[in-house]
Amino acid sequence: MRIGLIGAGAVGQSVGALLVATGWCSEVMVASGSETSARGLVTDLEDMTEVTGSPTRVTVGTPEAMGACDAIVLSPRARFTNTARSNVRMAGLVANGPLIVHLARQLTGYSGVAVMVTNPVDVLARVFAERSGCERVVGIGAATDTARYRLTLARHLGVPVGAVDGHVIGEHGDAAVICASTTTVHGDPVTVPVQHVRDELAARPRRISKGIGRTRLGPAGAVLDALAHTLGILDGLTEVSVRQDAGVWLGMPVHYTAGTPSLRPPSLDDSETAQLAAATEKLHAAYTQLTEEI
């Protein structure tokens, strides 16, 4: 398999390292807004392939040259300072949107899998899909949110993380829906401290950014998981942002069998249903804003 990687920043570097380390793709082609960055990352990854004995070949490419790739990871980021205290991911809409539109034009008719990383991921996954015509576009975010949810609840209750079964769906952002009504621990219903969980979901990325500058490893792991499922390397349930009936991309549990998706939305109570409707409206409004400005 050949994987295209657009963006040589924190997440792009981490994804490249994971792909080389796993060794299940034959080639990783790297493109960046700066050719110097792309060549620097490729050189570093080449060193890694030699040290680890990885069979993966790493090359510098362009988005136009990635048409034959089985999957493309989209993680470019515009140069802007994000000063938002709320809706932090949505604050990148106007800055990052034109980048994704430009890439969609370069990749018009792309038939492989496109994994959107750039925030606001749900809106930009929709933009890329509609502008490129690519039919297999997923966004990451829900997988990271769900992992953080399970970690937080497990630590709060003093149980192993593997005992917690629950999801975070909807927007990868402030309108995320914590599916507390269907969450179980060891198979039994549990009372979820929703506000505590929500506070921790917001605090974790801030803690990471304060310590190391930018989140990278969690999102990179979510990218690898999305690639493995969408490309048929791994069967099972994962959380990705996908198109819903309203045309909006939302994070949802999806079961993949040999790369074929089957949506598995969790049951929601009245409050969670209202939250999901609000997230849908919010993301559609952001999409409309972006398309009007572009």
Image: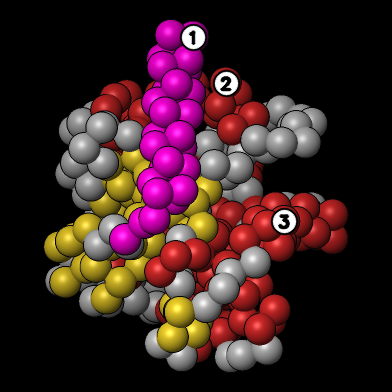
- The relative height of residue 23 versus residue 255 in the rendered view (above or below) is below
Q: Which residue is mark 1?
A: 293
Spatial CA span between label 1 and label 2: 8 Å
Residue at left offset 45%, top offset 79%: 189
Spatial CA span between label 3 and label 2: 26 Å
Q: Quadrant of the N terminus?
A: bottom left
Amino acid type of disc 3? Answer: Asp
Element at label 1 = helix
Going from N to C along the chain, the mark reached first, 1 or 2, is 2
Residue 30 in the image: state x and y as whole percent.
46, 50
Q: Which one is in front, 263 or 79?
A: 263
Do the residues under discs 1 and 2 have CB atoms within 8 angstroms? Answer: yes
Residue 290 in the image: state x and y as whole percent.
47, 17
Q: Which residue is mark 2?
A: 94
Queried whether the magenta region covers residue 291, the answer comes back as yes
Q: Which residue is mark 3?
A: 199
- Badge 2 local density, few (<14 within 10 Å), some, or many (20+)? some
Queried whether the magenta region covers residue 286, the answer comes back as yes
